[in-house]
Amino acid sequence: MSKKHIVIDPITRIEGHLRIEAVIDENNTIVDAYSASTMFRGIETILKGRDPRDCGLLAMRICGVCTGTHYQRSIEAVEDAFNITIPKNARIVRNLIQGSLYVQDHLVHFYHLHALDFVDVVSALSADPAKTAEEARKWAGVAGVTPYTDGPSEFKEIQDRVAKFVKQGRLGIFGNGYWGNKHYKLTPEQNLIGVAHYLKALDIQRDLAKMQAIFGGKNPHPQSIVVGGVTCVQDIENPARIALFNQLLADGTKFIKQAYLPDVYMAGTMYADEALDSKATFTELMQGKGVGGTGGGLLNFMSYGDFRLDDTGFYHSALLFPSGIVYDGDISKVQDVEHEKISEDVTHAWYEGDKPLHPYDGQTIPKYTGLDKRSDGIAYLKTDEKYSWIKSPIYNDTRVEVGPLARMVVGVARKDERITRYVMDFLKRGNLPVSVLFSTIGRTAARAVETLIMADALVEWSNELAANAAAGDLRTWTEFDFDKVSMNTKGVGLAEAPRGSLGHWVRIANGLVTNYQAVVPSTWNAGPRDYKGRMGAYEASLIGTKVADPNQPLEIIRTIHSFDPCIACAVHVVDTKGKELGVYKIDTQCSI
């Protein structure tokens, strides 16, 4: 049997540094795959010896996208260690900041990081603008809305702009694509719709980012969350700030409903054959039968749960996204998540260690062993040894997938009324079986459904905040005496980030951090083989995928992008020769 080795390094249109190696057989079907982060991560080591109240400001630097999410998880881990319950306003404000991030991040992902895996930009040049307008109305009708863009003149203007770029040989952001690949399935008119909304989304996402800054102080790297609550008292008191938030949200929601969802219906329908390897009904799926389309992968889904809906305590509140774990795609069964069952293995990661460790006991000790240099001049991963800077997280001795799809699967399995209603409405309008979710297309669709859920929930939280402030409750912080709280303790912040389950664990002794570990979504999904040789979610999702052209591995890119990789959450810079890059000292006692 003839096999070919494909190397994609770097995977582009992601945050961070990711390499994928895949082995295909004589039919161009992937029979083996390896995921590797190519840069070192070291934030945990930097946090040792710090005042735990400062950890959030440093931990947010783990990622350039989900800055506020790492910030809040770190703060929550310290609050858990000190047994602090935050006020109602703080809970709502944190929901608004995080929810705004979800909406903006998901929109950016679909259009600017993932859409070009479905949309052939060059094909759009041959589209008929009048027919494009008709096509836009068709897919908006599926979503039950009017189209965001439906004028032939608007589509013609965008077409002319792209044509000018092509003629001048400067495609810019659309350069170096696999244009013309036969696994692009949209018509020229559908491609023009995608390009038009891609460009418009550049403006929309900027306004959505402003929503995060209203209560966060700025974006990225918000600064209003502190141990015990939030600091944005004047924003809560001022109705104009809440009104601005609501207006930006309304504008963004219009685009989500009239462009994003119709575009996902369009792409999902045109690529449905890849998602419908299984045609199980909802009833059959509830019985654990018939799952798995192209890109389905592990079929084990986990969500820590997130977005508290009341003030009964961090781990006791009702949640927008319920917590749970579903095995083998069987949504008739769901189990509770227990963080004690989480561990990280480094058998195939460039770290020292000989057994899986719980994050409270985790170690981050680099042990780089290099690549395998072959005679053809290409340096391949040493896949039998260590081959990634990402560890391999394990839950209850099982590899799992996290992210929007996991949250929707767990929500349906939990029979959560809101999530089930949104998911089933989406599938009904698209005339799609539930089994379509267990695929690359389904992962993308789940993110769109979640975006709509979040946009609607943000309206509820904004109204709740306004009503609470109007009633005279302006409390934003729970006072605590740092010198009197336990100086020898530990805590964990478990919740969700846009890309999936995120946990921060901290140990504190004598008022300082003695150990800190973050297990992030892209670690769960992008991790290499574990000590039993089991694949991570990225690797498993590629098995069985057919590649039309090995020199243009569009199908690999499409499936990996469906997870929305963010490898900054798993890596940070290091000098490969071990040289110290710099030492910085900050005088915090300076006088003015």
Image (spheres, grey):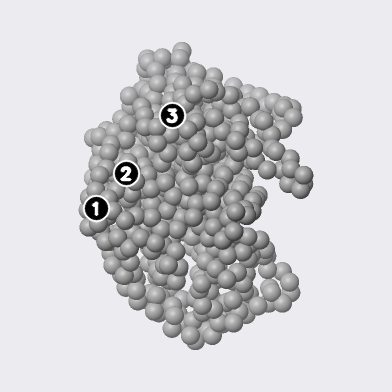
Query: Badge 1 local density, few (<14 within 10 Å), some, or many (20+)?
Result: some
Q: Disc 3 marks which amino acid?
A: Ser
Q: Find residue 170 and report its horizontal and vertical position in percent.
A: 72, 69
Q: Find residue 410 and report its horizontal and vertical position in percent.
A: 31, 47
Residue at left offset 49%, top offset 81%: 132
Say which element carries label 1.
Answer: helix
Residue at left offset 53%, top offset 39%: 528
Q: Earlier in the sequence, mark 2 or mark 3?
A: 2
Q: Quadrant of the N terminus?
A: bottom right
Residue furthest to the front: 1
Query: Badge 2 local density, few (<14 within 10 Å), some, or many (20+)?
Result: many
Q: CA distance from mark 2 to mark 3?
A: 18 Å
Whether residue 53 is visible here, answered yes or no, is no
Whether residue 328 is visible here, answered yes or no, is yes
Residue of label 3: 343
Residue of label 2: 326
**For the residues bearing labels 2 and 1, Cβ distance under 8 angstroms:** no
Q: Is residue 197 left or right of residue 242?
A: right
Residue at left offset 43%, top offset 29%: 343
Residue of label 1: 286
Q: Earlier in the sequence, mark 2 or mark 1?
A: 1
**Up/down of 437 relative to 123, above or below:** above
Query: Badge 3 local density, few (<14 within 10 Å), some, or many (20+)?
Result: many
Say which element carries label 3.
Answer: strand
Q: Disc 1 marks which amino acid?
A: Met
